[in-house]
Image: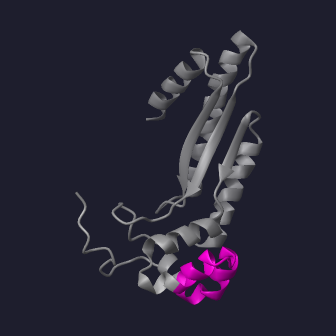
């Protein structure tokens, strides 16, 4: 599978493109450290192709990894999944950042775990989320809202949903 992607990356650099952005999701169910290492390895392989082209043109290009954290959304295959605990997400992000920092001309951007927690809460909660949302809309910081409503937010975010989902009555299509 990566061979097809790497063939396309090679074509991108051969045709004079100087910027490449790759997108990834961190925190998927059953994700292991090897998966994070595979992202780093893929970035390195893309960088090697970039440098191969740079040796011919004298122009060193740039690769950017755009990384997001899993936010289980309704009507996706992950809608019932729990978000990985914040401490573990931070560890995985740190692992990825360390790997990318060893690759010159490769950068990355990453959403924060707090942002992922808030977005997951918004995508899963029902009408009971009205008060926290109203507080944030009136200017209370999201961090403060998340602390204040932690007992309400965390079960929505860090639990799987074996029961019927709130959005079950809506039909797509």
Horizontal and vertical percent position of residue 134 = 56, 81
Q: Among all residues in the image, which is located at the extreme front?
A: 138
Q: Relative to residue 101, is residue 22 drawn left or right?
A: left
Please tell me in which quadrant of the rendered image residue 127 appears.
bottom left
- Where, quadrant-wise, is the N terminus in this rendering? top left
Residue 50 drawn above or below residue 27: above
Instruction: Find residue 50 and report its horizontal and vertical position in percent.
Output: 65, 24
Position of the C terminus by quadrant: bottom left
Residue found at x 62% / y 66%: 115
* Residue interval drawn in magenta: 131-153
The residue drawn where x is 67% and y is 49% is 109
* Residue 17 falls within the magenta-colored stretch: no
Is 82 above or below relative to 70? below
Q: Residue furthest top?
A: 56
Instruction: Where is residue 111? Give x, y as percent.
Output: 63, 58
Foreground of the two, 173 or 160: 173
Which of the 4 quarters of the picture holds residue 114? bottom right
Q: Which residue does the image show at 66% across and 30% down from the upper left?
A: 47
Left or right of residue 57, residue 136 in this image: left
Decide which of 140, 59 is in the foreground and name it.
140
Q: Residue at x 61, y 31 (%)?
A: 20
Res 40 visible? no
Q: Which of the pair 91/125 is nearer the observer? A: 125
Q: How is the image coloured?
A: one colour
Q: Give the main secondary structure of the magenta stretch.
A: helix
Residue 172 seen anywhere in this rendered image of the structure: yes
* Number of disc labels: 0
**163 over 122 or under it: above or below:** below
Expressed as whole percent of the image width and height from the top left, the position of residue 133 reads 55, 78
């Amino acid at each position: 599978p990566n061979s097809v992607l790497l063939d396309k990356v090679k074509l991108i650099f051969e045709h004079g493109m100087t910027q490449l952005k790759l997108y990834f999701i961190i925190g998927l169910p059953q994700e292991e450290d090897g998966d994070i290492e595979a992202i780093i390895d893929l970035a390195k392989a893309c960088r090697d192709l970039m440098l191969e082209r740079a040796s011919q043109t004298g122009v060193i290009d740039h690769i950017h990894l755009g990384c997001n954290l899993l936010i289980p959304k309704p009507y996706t295959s992950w809608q019932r999944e729990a978000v990985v605990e914040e401490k573990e997400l931070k560890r995985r992000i740190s692992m990825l950042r360390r790997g990318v920092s060893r690759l010159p001309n490769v950068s990355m951007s990453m959403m924060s775990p707090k942002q992922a927690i808030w977005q997951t809460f918004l995508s899963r909660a029902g009408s009971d989320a009205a008060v926290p949302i109203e507080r944030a809309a009136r200017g209370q910081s999201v961090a403060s809202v998340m602390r204040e409503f932690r007992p309400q937010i965390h079960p929505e975010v860090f639990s799987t949903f074996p029961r019927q989902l709130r959005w079950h009555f809506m039909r797509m299509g």
